[in-house]
Amino acid sequence: MKDTLLKCKIDQSRPFPLSVELNCPAREIHAVVGPSGSGKSTLLRSIAGIHRPDQAEIKWDKHIWQQSHQGLFLPPHKRLVGSLWQQYSLFPHLTVTQNIAIASPWKHHRRRQQINELMQELQLTERAHAYPQALSGGEQQRVALARALARRTPLLLLDEPFNALDRPLRTDLLQMTRSLCQSHRLTVLWVTHDIEDAFLISDRISLLRKGQCMRTDSPEELVRHPHDLYVIKQLGWQNYYECEIERIDHHSQKIFWQGLELISHCPLP
């Protein structure tokens, strides 16, 4: 059992209600999925320290980042967080190498070595001296990801950075990101509205709706035991029907559907 490193409990009423509790074990890739306005990005910004909710308790391992009832709040630059947002925010006057180097904590030779390794991993070596305006969307995304990794932080936050890319390229970059995060031994919390993307690389998924966490589970458990209609709709399933259930015993139940009486020997939620 991996130790839980990120512990987050947020409760705010303004500018919109958000009540979420989230725990991430070490080296887990955890997706937060929900429609626009569900609170996904606000959750991420709260963990990064960019947004300060009314009431929150946010911890990384033994480090307290926010504890509202004690008046404690650690500013963003002191949190052990690398982040990649929807806007890549690359510096237009800096080359690929310089954009990555600006985030590195190392000096001189060690910095050059780190940057070269990251550019190799992200297939950017041939674009080392290019400027952002000369890069494709996928290349810009990889530069921004390399810059986030260059900070050498144990936690990486991703705010829908892949959504502007077409499906085949997005799939390739998601798989590359998973491989990189595993090799760098990172804990990753990322938000998306696309359940397919979440299933592709995530160890666990939290489903958000109107500021509430409806369910947190592995992709496999969500599919096997969706439990409620909201989860079923998020999974994109179309074949669901209303019925009446009469429990016979702990393992069996009668299902009445469209005039039919069915017997199920599998436990139902």
Image (cartoon, rainbow, N blue to C red):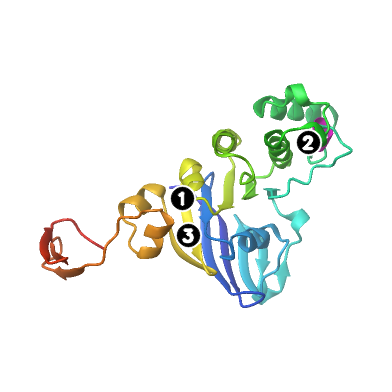
| Residue assigned mark 3 | 207
Query: How would you rate the neighbour count of disc 2 (Cα within 10 Å): few for under 14, some for 14-19, many for 20 or more?
Result: many
Query: How would you rate the neighbour count of disc 1 (Cα within 10 Å): few for under 14, some for 14-19, many for 20 or more?
Result: many
Horizontally, is 256 left or right of 11 in the view? left
The boundaries of the magenta stretch are 96-100
Q: Is residue 72 magenta?
A: no
Q: Earlier in the sequence, mark 3 or mark 2?
A: 2
| Residue type at numbered disc 3 | Leu
| Residue type at numbered disc 1 | Arg
Q: Is residue 97 magenta?
A: yes
- Classify the position of the C terminus by image quarter: bottom left
Report x, y in % for residue 178: 55, 37
| Residue assigned mark 2 | 100
Specify the quadrant of the image occupied by residue 42.
bottom right
Image point (46%, 50%), residue name = 204
Query: How would you rate the neighbour count of disc 3 (Cα within 10 Å): few for under 14, some for 14-19, many for 20 or more?
Result: many
Q: Earlier in the sequence, mark 1 or mark 2?
A: 2
